[in-house]
Structure formats: structure tokens, C-alpha cells
């Protein structure tokens, strides 16, 4: 078995070269080839001595996922389907906007948390992605999109908001973040990398210590009774604790606010009373709201709130001084909108095992 260098952090790669009797700068060199130049073949790394290149091709590899398909939406959103291992594939989405380009990556195949309005959650859980598999999505997208005419990278922001709960794949996600922030790899600032979580509090507290990036929290309900149903992890980590954790995170995070995501479900969580409760719930937390129109999928059992209802909900929050954005639905013609990512999941039988182990 050769070792895959794609998913190694700078420290790990430095350790790898150290064992070969090579200096630490080799790690920086090779990282640049892999992550900045999009190279997956050692023979092209011309500033690495030929002997070392030959050695590397014997003992190591740069194994990227296989591209199965690329789809482009009418609005410019792109979606790639990447094959990991036979039978398992994941989706990665690029969303171009006027002032930025955001890549949305997946952290797990499926998800164990079973939020009732989420298509990924409905599929069940198959397995965690490795660091190489998460970085592999970014590697592909950087390579496919390259730079704009000004010489800037087309991808300016990365969000961990695709399939899966990133904080339940903690080590691989933190290693991915470390590569995203590393100047010798993707060199993004902590403000341009956002992790979205449904609220796995102990892992969130570790993240705060180790690698605080911008944070989005999937709230979706203003009280425990409703959140217990919509976001079942709430039964384990209820709102009061979640609010305390968010308050604590703000002090370490690169932004001075948390983004609360709130999916707008018709007649479920979108009334005036829900808005009032929400205002009370978050009153002590520096935050912004991102209201997400529900993206339907077959047999979801939910409907999207009306545009009028969303406007009313939004204005109630704004009246109380909150900054509120309504997420534009992007890429729904190619099933790339939030909550529509499906990928391909075989063996969906492990949800219970994973959920009970938390
Ligand atoms: N597991 C993480 C990140 C992935 S989900 C989390 O839950 O935050 C990314 C976002 O999409 C979450 O806010 C999630 O609640 C939202 N989402 C899931 N299904 C959706 C749907 N059908 N319509 C709109 N948003 C959805
Ligand atoms: Fe998992 Fe997030 Fe979907 Fe919930 S919303 S099931 S945590 S991916």
C-alpha cells in the first residue's frame, strides 16, 4: 500500500519527508505542486530531485477521486459528482456570485443525524470521508475553475455545508481546514472558510480551541419541542446549551457573529410566534440570520413557506435589529440546492449504530 499524500497536512508531510531523510522544505514544495498547481503525478514536479521523485512514485501516491460527471445550472452553479470507492459517490457544488465564488463541500457519505427536512438525512449514513476525500473535492474544483482574468482564484470561499455533519467527522475535517488555511496549500483566511453544524456541542468546543473558522449553526426551530423533531440531535444537545456554546465560540471565531440558518417550512416553523420566540432565544448572541427557502424533494412531507411569509418573518427579525439574508435558491435545476445533494449511498443501514455511538 502506498501512502496518499493528498490528505496530509503540512506537519504530516514534513514528518513523512523527515523519515526519508529529507528537509522540511520538501513538504512545502510538494504541497504547492499538489494543491496550487493541481498536479497528481510526481514526474512533473521538476524542482524535486529526480531520484526523490522516483522514490516517491514507489512509496506514495496522489490519489484524487474520479470525476463521474459535471453539471452546470442555468444560473451558473456547477455540480460535480465524484466517485470515492465503488458504489459511493459524493457531490460538490460551486456557487458563483458577483463578489465571490463559494465552493460547498461534503464531509460524509450520507448523514446520521436524520433531520426530517433534509434529503441527505433521509438517506441514512454510510461513512466518514477521509481528509483526502474532502480535500479531493476542493482539489477538483480548483483545478476545474482555475483563475479569473485578473489572476485571482475563482473560488474565494469554502463552506462545509454539503452532505454530512462535519463535526461528526472531526479529525478529517480539522485536517482539511488546516490545508485550506495553509499558505502552501489553499491559503484561505479563516473568515472565508465556514463550517455549518447542526450543533454537536463537544466537537464545537474543540473546534473553538483548535481551528476556529467562521461558524454557521443550523437552528431551524426556536424551541426544544419543535427542534427535537426537526433536528433530532437537539434531544442530546438542547437549545440552552447550544446558545451557550455559540456565545463562547464568538469570542474565538474569526467573525464577531454566528450565522444562524433557518429553513422556512410552511406552517411548521414560520409563524409570527416562532419569530418572536427566535428573537428571545438569540437575544444575547451576536448573530446574523440566513433564512433558507425549503428545497423540496420527493416524499419530504414538507412544503416551502410562501414568499410573503418569508418576507414577514424577515421583517420581524429586522425590526429587532438583526441582519437577515434570505438565501437565494441556486442550482435547483440540477438538484444542487441546499438539502438536495444525494450522491450515491450504498449500505444505508448504519445510521442507528452511528447515532447511538455519539
Ligand atoms: N450538517 C450540517 C451541514 C450540512 S446541511 C448542518 O446541518 O448544518 C447544510 C444546510 O442545508 C443546513 O442548514 C441544512 O439544515 C440545510 N438544509 C438541509 N436540507 C434542506 C432543504 N431540503 N432545504 C433547504 N435547506 C436544507
Ligand atoms: Fe445531517 Fe445537516 Fe442534513 Fe441534518 S441538515 S441530516 S445534520 S446534513
Image: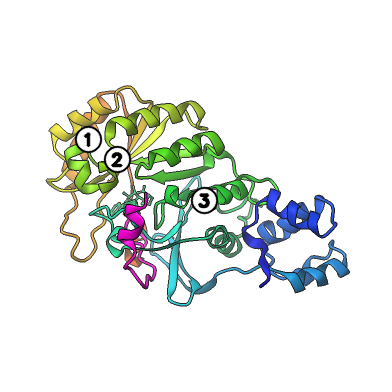
- Residue at position x 54%, y 47% from top? 174
How packed mark 1 is, by other alpha carbons closer than 10 Å (few <14, some 14-19, many 20 or more), is many
Give the left or right position of residue 63, taking residue 27 as reference: left
Give the left or right position of residue 229, taking residue 8 as reference: left
- Where residue 248 appears, as percent x and y from the top left, is 43, 27
Asked whether residue 71 is in view, the answer is no
Q: CA distance from mark 2 to mark 1?
A: 7 Å
Q: What secondary structure is found at the residue carrying circle 2?
A: loop
Whether residue 292 is in magenta: the answer is no
Q: Is residue 199 above or below residue 149?
A: above
- Where residue 64 appears, as percent x and y from the top left, is 59, 68
Magenta-drawn segment = 336-358
Kindly indicate whether the residue at mark 1 contacts the one at mark 2 (C-beta within 8 angstroms): yes
Look at discs 1 and 3 and give the one toward the viewer. Answer: 3
- Where residue 204 appears, as percent x and y from the top left, is 44, 39
Identify which residue, 85 or 193, lies in the foreground: 85
Question: In the rendered structure, which disc, 1 or 3, sits on the residue that comes first in sequence?
Answer: 3
Q: What secondary structure is found at the residue carrying circle 3?
A: helix
Image quadrant in which you'd find residue 354: bottom left
Identify which residue, 107 or 274, lies in the foreground: 107
How packed mark 2 is, by other alpha carbons closer than 10 Å (few <14, some 14-19, many 20 or more), is many
Which residue position holds label 2?
219
Which residue position holds label 1?
222
Image quadrant in which you'd find residue 335: bottom left
Amino acid at each position: 500500500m502506498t501512502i496518499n499524500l493528498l490528505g496530509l497536512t503540512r506537519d504530516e508531510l514534513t514528518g513523512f519527508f523527515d523519515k526519508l531523510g529529507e528537509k522540511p522544505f520538501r513538504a512545502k514544495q510538494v504541497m504547492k505542486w499538489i494543491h496550487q498547481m493541481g498536479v497528481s503525478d510526481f514526474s512533473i514536479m521538476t524542482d524535486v530531485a529526480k531520484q526523490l521523485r522516483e522514490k516517491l512514485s514507489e512509496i506514495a501516491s496522489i490519489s484524487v477521486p474520479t470525476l463521474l460527471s459535471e453539471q452546470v445550472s442555468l444560473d451558473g452553479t456547477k455540480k460535480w459528482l465524484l466517485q470515492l470507492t465503488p458504489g459511493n459517490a459524493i457531490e460538490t457544488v460551486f456557487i458563483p456570485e458577483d463578489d465571490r465564488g463559494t465552493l460547498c463541500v461534503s464531509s460524509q457519505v450520507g448523514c446520521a443525524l436524520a433531520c426530517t427536512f433534509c434529503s441527505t438525512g433521509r438517506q441514512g449514513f454510510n461513512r466518514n470521508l477521509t481528509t483526502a476525500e474532502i480535500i479531493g473535492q476542493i482539489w477538483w474544483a480548483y483545478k476545474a475553475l482555475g483563475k479569473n482574468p485578473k489572476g485571482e482564484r475563482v473560488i474565494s470561499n469554502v463552506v462545509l455545508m454539503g452532505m454530512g455533519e462535519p463535526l461528526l467527522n472531526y479529525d478529517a475535517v480539522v485536517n482539511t481546514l488546516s490545508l485550506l488555511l495553509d499558505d502552501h496549500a489553499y491559503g484561505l483566511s479563516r473568515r472565508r472558510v465556514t463550517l455549518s453544524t447542526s450543533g454537536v456541542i463537544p466537537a464545537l468546543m474543540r473546534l473553538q480551541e483548535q481551528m476556529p473558522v467562521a461558524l454557521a449553526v443550523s437552528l431551524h426551530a426556536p424551541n426544544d419541542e419543535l427542534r427535537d423533531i426537526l433536528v433530532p440531535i437537539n434531544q442530546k444537545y438542547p437549545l440552552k446549551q447550544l446558545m451557550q456554546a455559540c456565545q463562547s465560540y464568538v469570542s474565538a471565531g474569526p467573525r464577531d457573529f454566528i450565522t444562524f440558518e433557518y429553513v422556512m417550512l410552511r406552517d411548521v416553523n414560520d409563524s409570527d410566534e416562532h419569530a418572536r420566540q427566535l428573537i428571545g432565544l438569540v437575544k444575547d448572541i451576536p448573530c446574523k440570520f440566513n433564512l433558507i427557502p425549503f428545497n423540496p424533494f420527493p416524499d419530504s412531507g414538507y412544503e416551502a413557506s410562501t414568499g410573503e411569509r418569508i418576507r414577514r418573518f424577515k421583517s420581524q427579525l429586522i425590526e429587532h435589529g438583526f441582519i437577515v439574508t434570505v438565501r437565494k435558491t441556486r442550482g435547483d435545476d440540477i438538484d444542487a440546492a441546499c438539502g438536495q445533494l444525494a450522491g450515491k449511498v450504498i449500505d444505508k443501514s448504519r445510521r442507528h449504530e452511528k447515532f447511538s455511538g455519539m
